[in-house]
Image: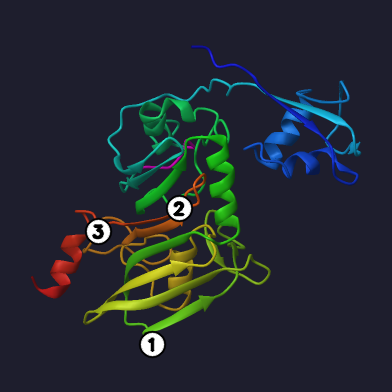
């Protein structure tokens, strides 16, 4: 069956407002940027005529929004094994393996999580953007663990809003060098682009606010296993914050150094909690360490 354009008809009943702001306040399942693009492309009519995003709408105006089917993308659907933890019509929660980039980019045009998802869930094509369909948050290529992916526009909008409003629980396990003192605390330090090494992030004056809560789960002679929870979601936040307080992640060759214990940085997203984007039901998932990380702990325990 060929997907059809979906048409929404509205009559303005509120006070005067910009067209894009008016539509963003309605339950269309689309983000503001998607709505602005549709307005610019002539898919929104006000009283029968095309309009601009900044055009004022007034009480009584008739607004017609046409949502074309998702555009076909140039991304390949590839059969890449990914462990599905939960799935329904709106979303899928996966356990991302280490070494798998989330979406195509320089150096990896395919063989990413997005390519795997397109094979598993073909309907996500075009959801949230051509290059990153369905993606509402990311994990670094070498970080393993839980990720949620939207399968509909409505789910993408809702889950993105939950992340923005800091209503999503994101918990990690990390093996770090040394023993933090105190054993429980919070790193509150702004993160931004490194002033000289542009591929790195750093704690910098004027960076974006970033807060990471931590507590020691297990101590070893020269290492600690930490449980960390993000209050914000900056690029490389945990890795930058742990290095900043003098306890870089074991195996982190970007912000620390290589380790004989692991072949990648020891970071695993083990806990994910959020509300279902349609029913509002609380959903919570936890998953154990992957097989490539457990030998490091066994070695430190002398097992």
Mark 3 nearby-residue class (10 Å; few <14, some 14–19, many ≥20):
some
| Position of 256 relative to 289 (above/below) | below
What's the distance in space between the residues labelled 1 and 2, CA to CA? Answer: 38 Å
Residue designated by label 3? 289
Tags 1 and 3 in contact by the CB under 8 Å rule? no
* Quarter of the image where one finds residue 126: top right
- Indicate the position of residue 1 as horizontal and vertical percent values: 48, 11
Residue nearer the viewer, 287 or 215: 287
Residue designated by label 2? 281
Q: Which numbered tag is attached to residue 181?
A: 1
- For the stretch drawn in magenta, the main secondary structure is loop
Look at 21% across and 63% down and name the residue there. 260
In what element is the residue under mark 3?
Answer: loop
Residue 16 at least partly seen: yes
As drawn, which residue projects farthest toward the top? 1
Magenta stretch: residue 105 in it?
A: yes
């Amino acid at each position: 069956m060929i997907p059809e354009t979906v048409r929404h008809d509205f009559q303005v009943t509120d006070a005067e407002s910009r067209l894009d702001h008016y539509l963003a306040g309605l339950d269309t399942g689309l983000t503001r940027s998607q709505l602005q693009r549709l307005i610019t492309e002539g898919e929104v009519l006000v009283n029968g005529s095309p309009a601009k995003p900044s055009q004022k709408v007034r009480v009584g105006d008739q607004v017609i929004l046409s949502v074309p089917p998702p555009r076909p993308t140039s991304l390949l659907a590839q059969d890449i094994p990914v462990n599905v933890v939960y799935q329904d019509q709106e979303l899928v929660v996966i356990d991302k393996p280490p070494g798998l980039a989330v979406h195509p980019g320089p150096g990896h045009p395919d063989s990413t999580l997005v390519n795997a998802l397109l094979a598993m869930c073909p309907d996500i094509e075009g959801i949230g953007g051509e290059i990153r369909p369905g993606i509402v948050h990311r994990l670094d290529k070498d970080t393993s663990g839980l990720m949620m992916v939207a399968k509909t526009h409505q789910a993408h909008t809702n889950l993105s809003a939950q992340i923005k409003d800091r209503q999503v629980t994101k918990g990690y396990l990390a093996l770090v060098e040394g023993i933090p003192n105190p054993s429980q605390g919070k790193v509150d330090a702004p993160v931004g682009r490194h002033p000289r090494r542009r591929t790195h992030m750093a704690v910098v004056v004027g960076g974006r606010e970033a807060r990471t809560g931590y507590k020691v789960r297990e101590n070893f002679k020269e290492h600690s296993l930490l449980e960390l929870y993000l209050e914000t979601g900056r690029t490389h936040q945990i890795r930058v914050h742990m290095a900043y307080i003098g306890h870089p992640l074991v195996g982190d060759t970007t912000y620390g150094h290589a380790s004989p214990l692991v072949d990648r940085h020891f970071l695993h997203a083990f806990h994910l909690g959020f509300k279902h984007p349609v029913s509002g039901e609380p959903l919570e998932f936890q998953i154990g360490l992957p097989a490539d990380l457990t030998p490091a702990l066994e070695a430190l325990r002398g097992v």
